[in-house]
């Protein structure tokens, strides 16, 4: 399977009547990223369906993914488009080849769902982040406790792309 480019992912979104946009800002060595999927509306601003926020340092394992949210009606495939665009951007525009995220532990049921979802994207557990003093920096970065996970950007792109294609065909 060939890995899609960011332009191809944007074309798939457009074919579904969706806008896929990336907002990238650089400050010194830190690059912040916001990926948004929205539905255009007549005489109104686009309807936000989903977004992901993160940041990267110019290192192979320094893509940190923070907030991922999908909301509203008719959002099938929105998450997959966001993940595919995020991984494609990392591979095309940064030296980052792996990403980290925290499956936050707000409640046990939601935490289990997040872990299962992130594993489907190819993320693997690194370690629990809890109340230990050594966990304080990670808790400050991600704003809570949970399971720290790492994923390969190329493998994540392949998985998210397949999911996005399946959703667009449905």
Image (cartoon, rainbow, N blue to C red):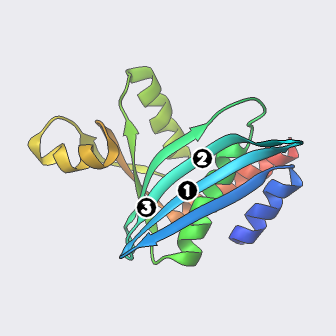
Quadrant of residue 117 within the rendered picture = top right
**In this picture, is 45 found above or below 23?**
above
Local packing at callout 2 (Cα closer than 10 Å; few below 14, some 14-19, many 20+) is: many
- Indicate which disc, 3 or 1, sits on the residue closer to the N terminus: 1
Position of the N terminus by quadrant: bottom right
Please provide percent x and percent y for residue 126: 31, 50
Disc 1 and disc 2: Cα gap in Å?
Answer: 7 Å
Q: Residue at x 82, y 63 (%)?
A: 11
Marks 1,2: beta carbons within 8 A: yes
SS at mark 1? strand
Q: Position of residue 146 (x, y in %)?
A: 32, 37
Q: Is residue 127 above or below residue 100?
A: above
| Residue located beneath label 2 in the image | 51
State left or right for residue 31 relative to residue 69. left
Q: Percent from the top left, x then y, of residue 136?
A: 17, 45
Label 3 SS: strand
Counting other residues with Cα less than 10 Å from the Cα at mark 3, is it few (<14), some (14-19), or many (20 or more)? Answer: some
Q: Nearer the viewer, residue 140 or 109?
A: 140
Side of 147 relative to 74 (left or right): left
Q: Real-space Cα distance between discs 3 and 1?
A: 9 Å
Q: Is residue 120 visible?
A: yes
* Residue at image mark 1: 34
**In the rendering, which numbered label is found on residue 55?**
3
Element assignment for label 2: strand
Visible in this render: residue 4? Answer: no
Q: Is residue 92 left or right of residue 42?
A: left
């Amino acid at each position: 399977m060939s890995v899609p480019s960011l332009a191809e992912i944007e074309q798939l979104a457009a074919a579904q009547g969706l806008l896929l946009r990336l907002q990238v800002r650089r400050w010194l060595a830190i690059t912040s990223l916001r990926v948004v999927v929205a539905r255009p509306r007549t005489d109104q601003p686009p309807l936000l369906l989903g977004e992901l926020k993160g940041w990267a340092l110019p290192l192979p394992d320094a893509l940190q993914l923070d907030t991922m949210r999908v909301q509203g009606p008719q959002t099938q495939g929105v998450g997959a488009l966001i993940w595919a665009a995020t991984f494609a951007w990392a591979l095309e525009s940064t030296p980052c080849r792996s990403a980290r995220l925290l499956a936050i532990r707000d409640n046990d049921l939601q935490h289990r769902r997040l872990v299962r979802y992130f594993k489907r994207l190819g993320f693997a557990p690194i370690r629990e982040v809890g109340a230990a003093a050594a966990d304080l920096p990670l808790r400050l970065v991600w704003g809570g406790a949970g399971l720290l996970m790492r994923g390969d950007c190329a493998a994540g792109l392949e998985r998210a792309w397949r999911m996005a294609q399946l959703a667009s065909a449905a």
